[in-house]
Image (spheres, grey):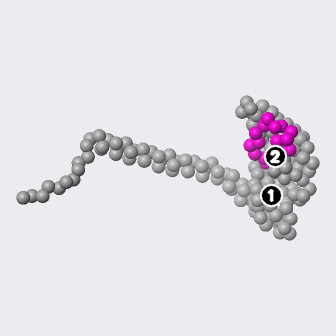
Amino acid sequence: MKKQSKQKQESPKEKTINHVLLGLIIALLAIIVFSSIFYLRASRPRMQAKQEAIEIAKKYAGLEEADHFYWFTRNHTYFSLTGKNDKGQEIAVIIPKSGEKVKVLAQKDGITEQEAKEKIAQAHPEVQIEKASLGMYDNQAVWEVVGKNSKDQFNYYLLSFESGKEIKTITGI
């Protein structure tokens, strides 16, 4: 007498479900891979700009430790860093895209990113703060605070680094 194997054969319905699940898994993996590649390519210029800014700040400002990196574009493009120099002092370094005329500021002589955001939040409570960047505008160091209003429009506020005064406002973009 032969022993019959008790292997269960898949029904056509189960085969279809397995094929659909396999297809979904492959599609999800493809989406993840392509999204990762897109993100890396999109962030490459920012990472490169940050690395170059750190090198310049180390050379010209004695930067030892960078806390924040900012990419600022108004009339011109600037890359800025905040951190500590080789003497342990809190500094801000503003570098034009050209890499020339690096401006080094003592953080104690101006307002911080957080203080800039707080000033805008107090002056414009209806605006949701999105980000802040440090740069130069009309030959003075400024914080650009970007916020969104209730109509999902962007507002841009430029504040003097030294005094914290609003020097320019662009609303409803």
Say which residue appears at 75% left-offset and 49% top-offset.
Answer: 71
Q: Which callout, 1 or 2, points at the residue further toward the start of the chain?
A: 1
Say which residue appears at 86% left-offset and 44% top-offset.
Answer: 119
Q: Is residue 134 magenta?
A: yes
Q: Position of residue 9 (x, y in %)?
A: 23, 48
Assign the C terminus to one quadrant of the image. Answer: top right
Q: Can residue 173 be seen?
A: no
Task: Examine the rendered structure and indicate whether residue 154 appears above or below residue 40.
Answer: above
Residue designated by label 1: 82
Q: Amino acid at mark 2?
A: Lys
Q: Secondary structure at mark 2?
A: helix
For label 2, count other residues whose C-alpha is less than 10 Å away and answer few (under 14), some (14-19) or many (20+): many
Q: Residue furthest left?
A: 1
* Of labels 1 and 2, the one closer to you: 2
Q: Amino acid at mark 1?
A: Thr
Say which residue appears at 42% left-offset and 44% top-offset.
Answer: 24
Residue designated by label 2: 117
Assign the N terminus to one quadrant of the image. Answer: bottom left
Q: Is residue 24 magenta?
A: no
Q: Is residue 64 left or right of residue 141?
A: left
> Where on the picture, by quarter, is residue 165?
top right
Q: Position of residue 115 (x, y in %)?
A: 85, 49
What range of the chain is rendered magenta? Answer: 118-135
